[in-house]
Image: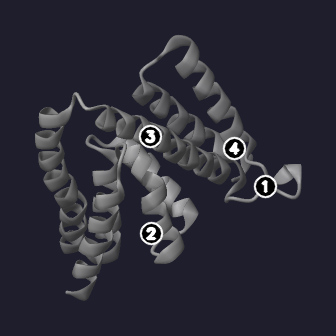
Amino acid sequence: MMMYLKLFWVFFQIGVLSFGGGYAAMPIVEDHVVEQLEWMSAEEFADVIIIDELTPGPIALNTSTFVGTKMAGLGGAVAATLGNILPSCILTFVLAKLYYKYRSLKLINGALGGLRAMVVALLASMSLTLIMTALFGGMRLPLALSDTDFLAAILFAGSLFVLRKWKLNPLLILLICGVAGLIGYPLLGC
């Protein structure tokens, strides 16, 4: 029972702080789940994000469900998920009422401009964490070039190029990279 309450409370706090959508929330989730509580390693967390990308629904919601399941099964999934969505349900209702009443005020527009900048910083932080984990296995640069995951680097660069140049469906690119990893890593002995 205590784990259910802890999951609910942790994800309730994350839900309160998750401005800017699911991707912007990922650094906050990572800080709680990986750094503070040590419920997962950085590599496990990166894997969770990948799995969450492949499943339908908001990434923050999927992540809370996944972490809750790992920590306490179905009850943990329900507790973490409810904790994650409750703040946004309450806050969205209150903010919608306030926004439609006061949207013409310069103060509101200034606050939204500041929040946009913060959201970009959160997205950049999470992106850097994912890149470092995928290419180097953690948040430290490797001491030797041989410590770099070159297949991951090639897949990353290729995916980025294809996404920017041809705007292909990201799910198709995820599928292609998954198959490339399934074939490539065993061939490389990884």
Q: Nearer the viewer, mark 4 or mark 1?
A: 1
Seen in the picture, residue 142 relative to 168 is either above or below; the reply is below
- Amino acid type at image mark 2: Val
* Spatial CA span between label 1 and label 2: 23 Å
For mark 2, what is the residue? 33
Kindly identify which numbered label has been placed on residue 80. none
Residue furthest to the bottom in view is 2
Q: Nearer the viewer, mark 1 or mark 3?
A: 3
Q: Secondary structure at mark 4?
A: helix
36 on left or right of 51: right
- Amino acid type at image mark 1: Leu
* Spatial CA span between label 4 and label 1: 25 Å
- Amino acid type at image mark 4: Leu
Q: Secondary structure at mark 1?
A: loop
Q: How is the image coloured?
A: one colour
* Spatial CA span between label 4 and label 3: 48 Å
For the point 75% across and 41% down, the residue is: 150
Between 107 and 85, which is closer to the camera in this rendering? 107
| Residue 38 in sight | no
For the point 41% across and 34% down, the residue is: 113
Going from N to C along the chain, the mark reached first, 2 or 4, is 2
- Residue 6 x/y as whole percent: 29, 80
Q: How many marks?
A: 4
| The quadrant where residue 43 appears | bottom right
For mark 3, what is the residue? 114
For mark 1, what is the residue? 141
Q: Are marks 4 and 3 in contact (CB under 8 Å)?
A: no
* Spatial CA span between label 1 and label 3: 32 Å
Q: Secondary structure at mark 2?
A: helix
Going from N to C along the chain, the mark reached first, 4 or 3, is 3
| The quadrant where residue 68 appears | bottom left
Q: Within 10 Å of the Cα at label 1, are there few (<14), some (14-19), or many (20+) other Cα atoms?
A: some
